Amino acid sequence: MPDNSLLIAGLTGVTAIVASSLASWLTSRGNAHAARIQVDATTAAQRREGTRQTRRAAYLVLIERAQTVADGLEGVDGLSAELEVALTAHCDRHQQLRRAVTIVDLEGPSAVSVAASNLLIMSGSLVTALTAAAETGSRENRIEFQETLRAYLRLIRPFVDAAAAALEET
């Protein structure tokens, strides 16, 4: 009987080399796959954080502009000349609010955009009410202006709540 030890030793060696190479190849593929998953997860987290920060900045600017509109009109209830000055200043603040609302519309989501648009619409109503009060000087128009201002102030909170909810979701 021929000596099979050399053949068995050769087969054992080849099997060990193949098994080692296969294990190394599988480990390398697994590591590459794990690295890809880690990169994808990190990229997604960075994208979410970037979106959150951009939205937060846009929301803060809008809140600041909305409050500036309100602050500029609180206490205005006087003579026609005072109302004219307030109207001119409000028109400037209204344009700044419009720009802030446009940015919020771009950033979304829709619930925040709707709340921002409601603020802008009511700010436009303030222009109308203030114009009427300045032109006529009547008590009724000044009362209507004050009611419109109170309605505007009530719309700030829903925007803040919608913005906070949107930031929680991102």
Image (spheres, rainbow, N blue to C red):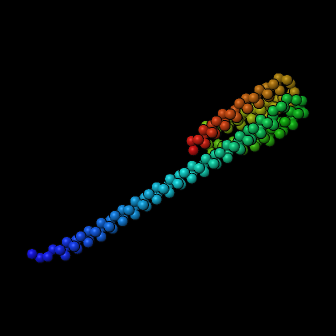
Would you place residue 20 above or below residue 143 in this image? below
Residue 98 percent coordinates (x, y):
72, 41
Q: Residue at x 17, y 74 (%)?
A: 5
Residue 98, can we see it? no
Which of the image's four quarters has the N terminus? bottom left
Residue 29 percent coordinates (x, y):
39, 62
- Indicate left or right for 21 with 161 as reference: left
Q: Residue at x 81, y 25 (%)?
A: 143
Image quarter of residue 34? bottom left
Which of the image's four quarters has the C terminus? top right
Would you place residue 71 above or below residue 28 in this image? above
Image quarter of residue 120? top right
Residue 168 percent coordinates (x, y):
58, 41
Q: Residue at x 77, y 35 (%)?
A: 70
Would you place residue 12 above or below residue 62 in this image? below
Residue 86 percent coordinates (x, y):
84, 36
- Indicate left or right for 58 with 130 as reference: left
Image quarter of residue 68? top right
Residue positioned most to the left: 1
Along the line of sight, which residue is nearer the eye, 169 or 98?
Answer: 169
